[in-house]
Amino acid sequence: MSSNRIEGNLKELRDRAKLKWSKLTDDDLDEIKDDRKKLADKIQYRYDKTQLEAETEVNDFEKGH
């Protein structure tokens, strides 16, 4: 897989994440990169959710729901 394709996939995932969790800032997403634990932590913080709720959302997001 070319680096351009990987970068494109990461950008697409970032765009999808911004649509789903609009309270996440660009700085949040820069910090998260591809770390699902950091993503769940940020969702928990920004949306005042439990850790389980945030992790469930990340799992669903990964599955494409």
Image: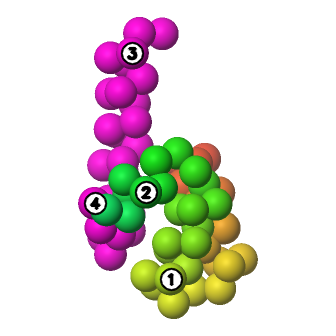
Distance between the Cα atoms at labels 1 and 3? 32 Å
Name the residue carrying label 3.
3
Of the residues shown, which amino acid type is indicated by label 3? Ser
Distance between the Cα atoms at labels 2 and 1? 14 Å
SS at mark 2 in the image: helix
Q: Which residues are magenta?
A: 1-26
Name the residue carrying label 1.
45
Image spot of residue 16 (x, y percent): 36, 51
The earlier-in-sequence mark between 2 and 4 is 4
Query: Would you identify the image quadrant in which residue 9 lies?
Result: top left
SS at mark 1 in the image: helix
Distance between the Cα atoms at labels 2 and 4? 9 Å
Residue at (30%, 67%) from the top-left corner?
25
Q: Residue furthest right?
A: 52
Residue at (32%, 75%) from the top-left corner?
23
The earlier-in-sequence mark between 1 and 4 is 4
Image spot of residue 58 (x, y percent): 59, 60
Name the residue carrying label 4.
26
Of the residues shown, which amino acid type is indicated by label 4? Asp
Residue 19 can be seen, yes or no: no
